[in-house]
Image (spheres, rainbow, N blue to C red):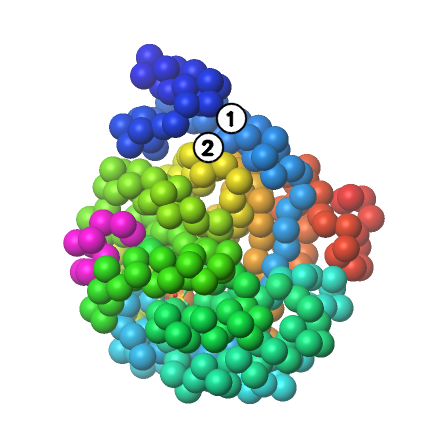
Amino acid sequence: TAFQVIMNKIEMGHELTKDDIVVLLNTEEPKEIETLYSVADRLRKEIVGDIVEIRGAIEFSNYCKKSCNYCGIRKGCDLPHRYRMDEDEIMEAVHQLVEMGIRTVILQSGEDDYYDTEMLCGLLKKIKKVTKMGITLSIGERSRFDYLLLREAGANNFLLKIETTNRKIFESIHPDNDYDQRIQCAKWLKELGYVNGSGNMIGLPGQKIEDIAEDILYFKEMGIHMIGIGPFIPAPGTPYEDLPTGSVEMTLKAIAVTRIVCKNVFLPATTALASIDPDGQRKALEVGANTIMLISTPEKYRTSYQLYKNKNMIDIESALEAVKNSNRKLPKYLKLPNKEGIQ
Ligand code: SAM
Ligand code: SF4
């Protein structure tokens, strides 16, 4: 069968074509799906090993100047609370991560110009100086010069998802964004030596399997190191509030194929997946994922960073559970209360 031919190609180390990827994403045969998942899991083990990286995400502002149609904190949403964390609050959250032994912090926000580049650079330098942590930024589109200054101030990763490589869909879901500009930003980040993060949503309106296949090939061609693949989940109060949620199974298949195609990359078990399936993190870890992002935003702000309905607040307990249930290991440097029995 076509499926078997593709599996043989993978065994021989041959590159997959778009058509091959479409066949893999399309299969609904339980046996084939099982094979796909186990091949992805084996490659994950061979290429990146058994350790699950744990990172902490601080969602420091829910103000946004843009109105992406899918997003629950878009400008057009009439939210009960918009908040901005100040430097002291952010540093406190950073210190909590340091206490757990976590070595990478993700600073995420809406596109909020209140934090100008000078202010962010000051914050980054401070974090670097007192903690030496790896810093990932996820603050949207900025100029090349801003990306340069932020890089020099200590940011080493940047997460800016392409969301979809289908230009038409990209434009219809992003009233304020230009597709070419998005690609330009990704190229700048790469040039500037960031560990380049991207990703997509599964189940966007009008999205076809072919589009997801193109996304995966794009990640490979662009040399993306960190790929967040999550289902689209409708958010109340947005133009897309009544659209159907993306499929868990298609998300898992996309993660598996991305591991096979992109090989040595960070693949998070995304918050979005964990939000529509309570067992989603474990499932993702078993089909190629190797990273978990804890939501480390202070309690009082968490519910205001509601990107979509029922957003799961991934905490350390649920992460440990997923790591344990997928028979994986935690990095040795983590200092966790109940580490016994997991290592
Ligand atoms: N403003 C920055 C940006 O857009 O890159 C960072 C924050 S934004 C909220 C982070 C990610 O949330 C987006 O890349 C998008 O994939 C995801 N997201 C937003 N709304 C979503 C939804 N309704 N369902 C699934 N993911 C969503
Ligand atoms: Fe703003 Fe990012 Fe949400 Fe778009 S996805 S509205 S840029 S926070």
- Give the mark count: 2
Q: Quadrant of the N terminus?
A: top left
Residue picked out by circle 1: 39
Which segment is the magenta one? 164-172
Q: Is residue 270 magenta?
A: no
Observer able to see residue 337: yes
Question: Would you say the residues marked 2 and 1 are in contact, meaning their CB atoms lie under 8 Å apart?
Answer: yes
* Location of residue 125 (image quadrant): bottom right
Task: Say few, some or many: other residues with alpha carbon within 10 Å of mark 1 (under 14 / 14 to 19 / 20 or more).
Answer: many
Q: Is residue 169 magenta?
A: yes
The secondary structure type at the circle numbered 2 is helix
Residue located farthest toward the top when viewing the structure as drawn: 1
Report the mark closest to the observer, 2 or 1: 2
Q: Nearer the viewer, residue 54 or 10?
A: 10
Residue picked out by circle 2: 260
Q: Does mark 1's beta carbon lie closer than 8 Å to ligand 1?
A: no
The secondary structure type at the circle numbered 1 is helix
Q: In the image, is 38 to the left or to the right of 218? A: right
Q: Name the residue at 57% across, 81% down.
A: 123
Q: In the image, is 234 to the left or to the right of 91? A: left
| Residue type pointed to by label 1 | Val
Q: Quadrant of the C terminus?
A: top right
Q: Name the residue at 28% across, 68% down.
A: 68
Relative to 291, say whether 151 is above or below: below
| Residue type pointed to by label 2 | Ile
Circle on res. 91 = none
Q: Position of residue 122 (x, y in %)?
A: 56, 83
Q: Earlier in the sequence, mark 2 or mark 1?
A: 1
